[in-house]
Image (cartoon, helix red, strand yellow):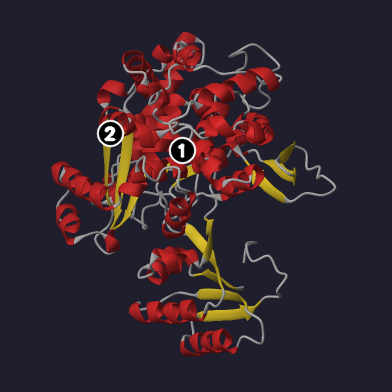
Amino acid sequence: MERLKISAGEDTEAMLQFVLEDLSDEQLDELDIHRTPAPDYGMNNEPITISVVIGAATVAAVTRLIGQWIETRRQIKQLEIVAQVPEDHPETRNALVKLAGDNAAVALRYAEPSADLELPL
Amino acid sequence: MPIRSHVDPCLFARFIYVDGSVVSPAVLEQIEGAPDQERYFAAWRAQHESTPHVIFHEAYHFWQGLRLPYVYWYALLSFRGVAQAFDTANSVGDVHEWDMLIPEFYRPRLSYQLFHVGRRSVELSTRGATPESYIARAVVSALDLLEAAASIAQYQATVGTAMASDPLAFARWCKRTPSYTRVFTFVARVLESEETALRSLLPLINTCFRTSDPVRAFHIVLAVLAREMDTVDEWLGQPEPLWWSGHFDEWLDAYAGFEGPPDSTTDLLKPTYCRLTLDHWTANSLEHPLLSKSARAWIEAAAENPVYGWAIDQPAWASDVLSKAREDFEPTATVVRFGLAGTGNRVFVMSREDRLTYDIRDLLTIWSVIRRAAGSHFDPDHRLCHHSSCPEFQANYCNSYPIIPSRFEDCGFPPRLKRIREGLRNATQEKGEMPYGAPQDLSW
């Protein structure tokens, strides 16, 4: 499975909603999605997403949707992506390289296959 | 970080933050222009319809304060701690020098480790000990359980009875909706059944909040449920709503190993492990300024209609009662902030005067100062005001004060705080005692 950990600060949920917007239930079933909520500071909070891990057989389409989301924004502060994508998966790797190349605000790095992406960035 | 809507577990005011850049033109029209309470209410009603999930989530947290004895007990005693802290700090002249540690405030955040150690087997660790091997680990506090419950309640109230127990529908909802699902995932793994986890988790959590140590109770009830899974097939085969709470209560009686009789502790730091009951704490002479009257009203409603007794445990099957509860048991005080870039924030308070014990503006003033000085139950980004050139802005002791004037020079926070402090000082001198022992003495 390929996985991306993405943080777009306070815009993370907006980005995720853009990615999920047009997916059918069946397409959604193919995705693993794990949100990390903001710290609670001892209160009962509205859940706000500060980062999300998206996993699927291939996340190339997700990567391209992120690029489209960035195009809809006038500006984004920073978007960090940690990618767990094997080297022999060229479609996703190429999509990630293009995303980072086209957008200066995107910071891309790769994680080892054994890394726990649900840990803080 | 974005400022988040929340209910704090101490004062129990609901704060709703609305990002002005994403509201509808209809809402924007209502909140722009000169301050006007009626137009703000209209904007709130419109916003209510466009973000029902946030509104429900925070309303559910308020209901937890009314219905779950631990949450009520904590609010009652911790707010007494606020009054004590305010009184003690009052001897320090400049409020900006108030800096305090209130250890009791950390109680709901105290984390335990739960380990899934084998087939349908779970262990609890309170002091960092780790089993030699385990399948999964969850770090869980009382607050985590409350959030997990609020998310499941939100789901079940949204989808109704047809899908309330459907794990696939829940999984899809969780993917599409920001929610707290970590506890559910752990419980589903332990029980080896997402469906049973979805059906049982909300009543399980709520049952555990009828004790002075909800996470400890959670471990016991979960362990028994996991153990019993193979023997309760026939019972599980019946349609919902099943009486989960009754069974969980019986298991607590049998296995919890309570250390004292019910309601035998007021110690937030090291409470005796015991049952807590709403009847006892709502009859106490100590009054919570936002919860007590509503909690007693809910108990009266439950005496007339038993569904009120379990409505927050199984919301999908109590939709009529919860619809009514959304009117009758709205949070006693809601502070709404529409954040508008350029023209400043629009802030207003909605409060139920018949359910309040004191002036909400005074309560919010005191709470602002103490949560800032103690640094707990406080998000450093939390503020209502936009006047960044005000000398009070940086220190943010006014974080929850809800009346934002056009000019910061006209702000009522400093004079109100001064009046409260002088009144408290005089009351203490006249009576020779701190005025928090009996609620009627709180003459701020």
Question: What residue is drawn where x is 44% and y is 15%?
Answer: B282
Of residues B228 and B365, the one drawn nearer to the viewer in this rendering: B228
Give the mark toward the camera: 1 or 2: 2
Question: What residue is drawn where x is 85% and y is 47%?
Answer: B132
Q: Are marks 1 and 2 in contact (CB under 8 Å)?
A: no
Q: Residues within 10 Å of mark 2 (few under 14, many from 20)?
A: few
Of residues A62 and B27, the one drawn nearer to the viewer in this rendering: A62
Nearest to N terminus: mark 1 or mark 2 = 1
* Label drawn at residue B8: 1
State the CA–CA distance, disc 1 to disc 2: 23 Å
Element type where label 2 sits in the image: helix
Question: What residue is drawn where x is 33% and y is 35%?
Answer: B415
* Label drawn at residue B212: none
Direction from residue A42 to residue B387 in the image, left or right: left
Would you say residue A44 is visible in this rendering? yes
Q: Which residue is mark 2?
A: B323
Q: Quadrant of residue B315?
A: top left
How many numbered dots are placed on residues in this image? 2
Question: What residue is drawn where x is 31% and y is 53%?
Answer: B18
Q: Is residue B398 above or below residue B216?
A: below
Direction from residue A111 to residue B31 in the image, left or right: left
Direction from residue B75 to residue B262 in the image, left or right: right
The image position of residue A13, as x and y in percent, is 43, 63
Of residues B375 and B261, the one drawn nearer to the viewer in this rendering: B261
Q: Is residue B337 above or below residue A88?
A: above
Of residues B25 and A96, the one drawn nearer to the viewer in this rendering: A96
Would you say residue B32 is visible in this rendering? no
Chain ID for label 2?
B
Q: Amino acid at mark 2?
A: Ser
Q: Amino acid at mark 1?
A: Asp
The image position of residue B77, as x and y in percent, is 53, 23
